[in-house]
Amino acid sequence: GNSVTQMEGPVTLSEEAFLTINCTYTATGYPSLFWYVQYPGEGLQLLLKATKADDKGSNKGFEATYRKETTSFHLEKGSVQVSDSAVYFCALNTGNQFYFGTGTSLTVIP
Amino acid sequence: EAQVTQNPRYLITVTGKKLTVTCSQNMNHEYMSWYRQDPGLGLRQIYYSMNVEVTDKGDVPEGYKVSRKEKRNFPLILESPSPNQTSLYFCASSYGRARTDTQYFGPGTRLTVL
C-alpha cells in the first residue's frame, strides 16, 4: 500500500543550525511528494513539492529532492530561524488520495 | 483572497448530539476532503468528494457523513458523536485529482465530545 514515514520528533535546534527531517515513502506508480508546515493554531500550508524523480522543491530556504532510488524526500534548511518553529508533514499524492506522515515538531531556540 | 473556511473553529458537545461542521472554498475547486488529526497518527482522511453529488469514503469514515450539494461547500456531519471523535478536523480542497495537485487547508475545527 501507500504510506509515508517521517522521523519522529520533537526536534530542538539552536538558531542558525542545520535542519534535516527525514521522510521515506512507499507508493505504487509515480506519486508527487510534498512538505506541508503547520504553525501553532493554524491549518497546513504547502511548503514545497516535487512531482517527478530528481526534482528539487524549494521555498523559504527549505529544500527537498525527490529520490526514487531511495524512496526519500528529506527536508533540509541550512540555517533555521525561531520563526521556523512548527510541525512539518511529509505527504504523497497518488492522484487517488493524499497520504500524510505523522508530523515532526521543530522548535528553534534563540 | 483564496481560502478554505471552516466553522466553528472550536466546539464542545455531548455524546449523541448531532452536529455539523461547515467547510467552504472560494477557489472553484472540484476536489474537497475532510481529515482528522490525532497525536501520533498524523492526518487521516475521512471522506472526499470529486465533484457535486460525488462523495467517497476515506480511511476512517465510520461515524461521519458528508454531502456535496454545491461545488463550494462540503459539510461534515456527526449524527451521534462519541468521545472517540474528539479530534482536530481539517477541510481541504484542490483543483482536481491529478497527482500534481496541491491541497489547500482550512484553519481547523477542534471538536471535544464529552
Image (tube, rainbow, N blue to C red):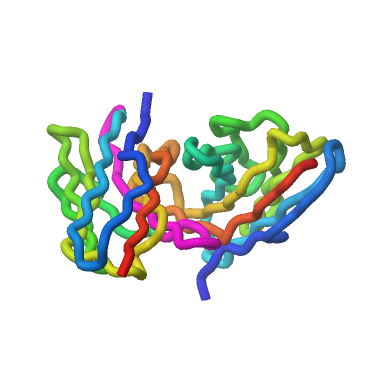
Residue with the most extreme right position: B17
Closer-to-camera residue (A88/A64): A88
Task: Identify the magenta region.
Answer: A28-45
Q: Quadrant of residue A57?
A: bottom left
Horizontally, is A54 left or right of A8 in the view? left
Given the current orientation, which residue lies at the most extreme bottom position? B1
Residue B31 location, x and y as percent? 52, 49
Number of dots carrying numbers: 0
Q: Is B21 placed left or right of A84 in the picture?
A: right
Q: Which quarter of the figure has residue A46?
A: bottom left
* Residue drawn 68% across the image and 41% down it: B86
The residue sitting at the top extreme is A1
Q: Nearer the viewer, residue A89 or B40?
A: B40
Specify whether B12 is left or right of B95.
Answer: right
Query: Residue A33, position in %: x, y?
Result: 29, 45
Q: Is residue B111 above or below residue A81?
A: above
Q: Quadrant of the C terminus of chain B?
A: top right
Q: Please indicate whether residue A34 sits to the left or right of residue B21 in the image.
A: left
Magenta highlight on residue B48: no
Give x and y (percent) for residue B66: 69, 42
> Image height check: is B47 above or below A105?
above
- Where residue B77 sits in the image (x, y, percent)? 75, 44
Say above or below: B83 vs A51: above
Is residue A60 shown above or below A23?
Answer: below
Residue appearing at x 13%, y 33% in the figure? A69
**Residue at position x 52%, y 54% in the image:** B93
Residue B22: quadrant of the picture: bottom right
Within the magenta stretch, is there residue A37? yes
- Residue under the point 77% across and 49% down: B20
